Image (tube, helix red, strand yellow):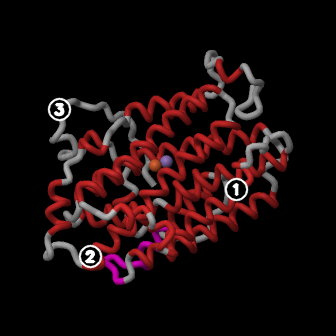
Amino acid sequence: MSIINNSKTDPNKILPITYSWAREYYKNGIANNWTPEEISMQKDVEQWKSDSVLSATERRLILWNLGFFSTAESLTANNIVLAVYNHVTNPEARQYLLRQAFEEAVHTDTFIYCCDTLGLDPDYIYNMYLTIPSISAKDEFVVEITQTVFDPHFTTDTPEDVQKFVRDLIGYYVIMEGIFFYAGFAMILALRRQNRMVGIGEQFEYIMRDESVHLAFGCDLIKTICAENPGVWTDEFKTEIVELVRRAVVLECDYARDACPEGVLGINADKFSHYVEHVADRRLERLGLPKIYKRDNPFPWMSQSTDLSKEKNFFETRVTEYQTGASLDWD
Ligand code: FE
Ligand code: MN
């Protein structure tokens, strides 16, 4: 048994389970179920329409993050369905991928909901990945490192091809979901801490909880493939991955500066950049690679391992009680 390159019939036989961690992540995803409509946008709409609540800098920051995430979520979903699912043949890993794909659909839906309730121009928001250079640079970077895997004739037969596939997994799980999402998470949650756009803040908090599971699954998947395919995780490949992470950090810091050029509420672009570097070190460590930046976490409030069911106001508007069993380390 192996997680990739199984025979054509094995993908249908989920029992007995080989990778119990994949099943755990699936159960975790189910326990974390949520939909954007459960969160009220009332206050956000009032604040967005008022001339006196949000500064121009805060509006820019909100628009930049809606612009980035609105298309990044579908990009991630497409990669799962069109590339990853094809090559990860193990059934319990596939079961998780189906759950993750659904979560990406929920995230995509979140940005539809935000656009609708705030009355934003969809043409403006959904074209920001083309019109805002700091956003397109991030998307293009991820697409560039994962291009070969989308070739319909691509297989994972040789160690070189497995390496390409692992590069795709690192591109999406570690760089896109693990680094490129985090300046945005920090910005929106910083606003929320100041009681601005709290509906979007809650939605981002849920998304971040989901993404932390995606990232954890992705890292386990990467490690399993590398363990089962000796000759893939070479020193040369490790050097290449570290270089990709460095380039990603530069792009994410550029994005943070562009989204938040002035600084808001005592937080400035330097702090967001330091946070991105801190996060990147955590990702490197997770892959078993040495830290580069050695930054202290400038936002300790981001790393609280939070059990959402303990959050007082989270569920006050809903009738059903959701079980939120997962308590993961969020950054
Ligand atoms: Fe997502
Ligand atoms: Mn995701």
Identify the residue under disc 1. Answer: 147
Q: CA gap, disc 1 to disc 2?
A: 40 Å
Disc nearest the viewer among 1 and 2: 1
- Counting from the top left corner in percent of width and height, residue 190 is at 30, 66
- Of labels 1 and 3, earlier in sequence is 1
Q: Is residue 224 above or below residue 172?
A: above
In front: label 3 or label 2: 3
Amino acid type for the residue under numbered disc 3: Val
Q: Which mark is first along the chain, 2 or 3?
A: 2
Query: Tag 2, which secondary structure?
Result: loop
Q: Where, by quadrant of the figure, is residue 243 drawn? A: bottom right
Residue 275 magenta: yes
Residue type pointed to by label 2: Leu
Q: Is residue 152 left or right of residue 135?
A: right
In the visual, does 148 lie left or right of 64? right
Residue at 27% across, 54% down? 116
Read off the magenta span.
262-276
> Could you tell me residue 171's position as x and y percent?
63, 56
Which dot, 1 or 3, sits closer to the camera?
1
Left or right, residue 167 beside residue 234: left
Which mark, by number, is residue 319? Answer: 3
Q: Is mark 1 within 8 Å of ligand 2?
A: no
Q: Distance of mark 3 from mark 2, alpha carbons?
A: 35 Å
* Residue at image location 44% in from the left, 33% down from the top: 28
> Would you identify the image quadrant in which residue 289 lies?
bottom right
Q: Residues within 10 Å of mark 1 (few under 14, many from 20)?
A: few
Q: Nearer the viewer, residue 206 or 242?
A: 206
- Do tag 1 and tag 2 residues touch (Cβ < 8 Å)? no
Quarter the N terminus occupies: top right
Where, quadrant-wise, is the C terminus in this rendering? bottom left
| Residue highlighted by disc 2 | 265
